[in-house]
Amino acid sequence: MILHQPGRSEIKLGELRSSQSSTPSRSRVRLCALAACLRGTRDLMTRQQAARIEVPVLIAVGTADDVVGSGSALGAIIPGAQVLDFPNRDHMRAVGYKVYKTGVLEFLSRRG
């Protein structure tokens, strides 16, 4: 499979596997994860579509994140959504934050 985005290099997923080992390296696994994200849809969701989401949703965002916008505003649109704010964290520093990890595990544990 080849992924292509205009202005970017092609990524051949078959080449991401290590030829020396059946276990891919961490960097190769990360590239595969990135490629999977790139395959995802780029279509924007309307407010009406977001309001019809019927599965549990955790919206985790840093309060200093100027990339994704307000988690609280999105949470107000999605019925039953839980918002987890990270004080003074930007987009790049939110995921590794201990509060993020704890919040995600708690959210998932309540889902069974």
Image (cartoon, rainbow, N blue to C red):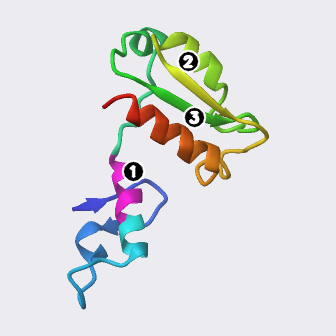
- What's the residue type where badge 1 is placed? Leu
Along the line of sight, the residue nearer the viewer: 54 or 31:
54
Q: Position of residue 54 (x, y in %)?
A: 33, 15
Q: Position of residue 97 (x, y in %)?
A: 64, 50
Picture disc at residue 101: none
Which image quadrant is residue 75 in? top right
Residue denoted by label 1: 38
* Element marked by disc 1: helix
Q: Looking at the image, do the residues carrying marks 3 and 1 touch, with CB atoms under 8 Å apart? A: no
Q: Please determine whether, in this image, residue 22 is positioned above or below residue 65.
A: below
- The residue at the point 39 percent across, 23 percent down is 56
Spatial CA span between label 3 and label 2? 10 Å
Residue denoted by label 2: 75
The residues colored magenta run 32-39
- What's the residue type where badge 3 is placed? Ala
Taking the view exactly as shown, the residue that stands out farthest to the right is: 88
Along the line of sight, the residue nearer the viewer: 52 or 57:
57
Spatial CA span between label 1 and label 2? 25 Å
- The residue at the point 71 percent across, 38 percent down is 65
Q: Mark 1 or mark 2, which has the lower sequence index?
A: 1
* Element marked by disc 2: helix
For residue 72, side relative to residue 7 (left or right): right
Spatial CA span between label 3 and label 1? 21 Å
Q: Quadrant of the N terminus?
A: bottom left
Q: Please determine whether, in this image, residue 62 is positioned above or below residue 3.
A: above
